[in-house]
Amino acid sequence: METTEFRSPIRKLVSFFRTSRDGWKEKYQESKRENKRLGNQVRAVERSRAHWRQVAKAKAQHVRQLERELEGAKNSTA
């Protein structure tokens, strides 16, 4: 295994590497939080759409039933 010789003093390198590590860790954790938030939002939207789709189907069925009743009432009076 090769060893890399650094020209800078170790104390400066340690600080630099620590800052670098902390930066990518924070970036990763932020992207993980964002991913989770977006996933939750997608599930909420899908659940909402399914609910409203079900409501729309029920209303359409009710409208068809009322139209049949109206047609029957028109035929019985004629």
Image (tube, rainbow, N blue to C red):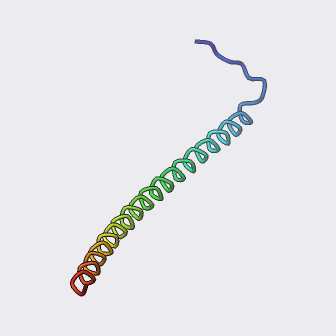
Relative depth, front residue between 76 and 18:
76
Residue at left offset 61%, top offset 46%:
27
Farthest front residue in view: 78
Left or right: 18 as drawn, with respect to 78: right
Number of marks: 0
In the rendered view of the protein, which quadrant contains the N terminus?
Answer: top right
Residue at left offset 26%, top offset 75%:
68
Relative depth, front residue between 20 and 5:
20
Left or right: 64 as drawn, with respect to 23: left
- When asked about the image quadrant of residue 73, the answer is bottom left
Left or right: 58 as drawn, with respect to 24: left
Residue at left offset 65%, top offset 44%:
23
* x then y, percent, for residue 40: 45, 57
* x then y, percent, for residue 7: 78, 23
Farthest left residue in view: 76
Residue at left offset 78%, top offset 28%:
8
Relative depth, front residue between 21 and 54:
54
Task: Check the image and report above or below for 33 versus 58.
Answer: above
* x then y, percent, for residue 11: 72, 35
In the rendered view of the protein, which quadrant contains the C terminus?
Answer: bottom left
